[in-house]
Image (tube, rainbow, N blue to C red):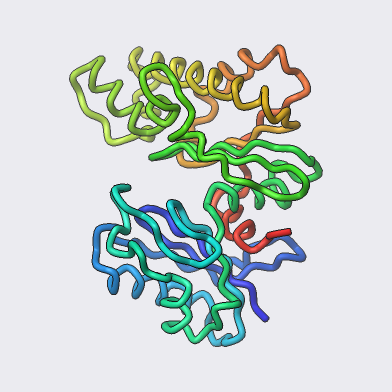
Amino acid sequence: MKHIGVDIGGSHITAAQVDLNAGKVIPSTVVRAKVYPHGNAEEILGTWAKTIAEACGEVIDCQLGIAMPGPFDYLTGICLMKNVNKYEALYGLNIKQELSERLGIDTQNIVFRNDSEAFLAGEMRFGAGKGLVRGIGITLGTGLGTSIYQNCEAQDMALGINYPMLEGVAEDYISTRWFVDTYRLKTQSSIEGVKQLVQLYPTDVIARELFEDFGQNLSSFIRGFIKQFEPEVIIIGGNIAQASEKFFPTIIQQLSANPTIQLRKAILNEEASLLGALSHK
């Protein structure tokens, strides 16, 4: 039986065959596609099924592990996304059954996993946290993903939208949205995202201030997180992590009172989710 890892994001899908024994994604099988998150159910499911089928190739006997954002019933496969600005056309549908019918794969061979859990499971078992037993995963992007790894298993914590911070919740201050909104507030100019801010960094004092403030925000959040879980490692992933050199020094300084905790940038990134979606205990 071939193992197919699938990573579904807010506007994309990636699928590939994975070798769980070696902890590797098979590069020649990787297939990516853009997905319009506001399309109708047939458009979305059709793109998902086509991408997964291409990754399977000629193999019929496949097991799928799908890393999926929430809200989602991961056991039954029923989509619960509503008022989250993506995939609302799928609300209430049994995605496991829908993919089974389109792909000819038995429902018992299709499993779903929270995307934050899948990321951390992949990084702890095969990537930046390999060899360690207690870890925290933080994914930085359009939202803030949080998960913990202990007892050989990853668990989503959903702290991005549930952890109180300043005048809102953590995700309001630790996300791409915060960078974009704060830069506009300070300069009356617009940026598309963090990548553009990195380009401005050498000559723009506001850009440098934002990365410093972001590091402080993230440090404050991490300090509250580690009090409860006492990790050996904190693994940072997601698109914003590509600019880690701009804010890691601030976090390292703020965490100097906890010298036993290692701060590491994810090394597998998307591949972590493809592997972690299949690597339940």
Q: Residue at x 66, y 32 (%)?
A: 234
Q: Residue at x 63, y 46 (%)?
A: 155
In the figure, 86 relative to 31: above or below? above
Judged from this view, the residue extending furthest toward the left is 188
Q: Is residue 40 left or right of residue 137?
A: left
Q: Residue at x 51, y 34 (%)?
A: 159
Q: Residue at x 43, y 70 (%)?
A: 95
Query: In which quadrant will I find the C terminus?
Result: bottom right
For the question of whether residue 28 can be seen, the reply is no
Residue 90 on image: x %, y % = 33, 64
Residue 253 on image: x %, y % = 63, 13
Choose top left, top right, bottom left or bottom right for residue 17.
Answer: bottom right
**Number of numbered discs visible in the structure rendering:** 0
Residue 75 on image: x %, y % = 55, 64
Q: Nearer the viewer, residue 135 or 72?
A: 72
Judged from this view, the residue extending furthest toward the right is 131
Residue 220 on image: x %, y % = 54, 18
For the question of whether residue 44 can be seen, the reply is yes
Query: In which quadrant will I find the N terminus?
Result: bottom right
In the figure, 137 relative to 24: above or below? above
In the figure, 162 relative to 211: above or below? below
Q: Is residue 170 left or right of residue 135?
A: left
Q: Is residue 186 left or right of residue 134?
A: left
Q: Nearer the viewer, residue 182 or 80?
A: 80
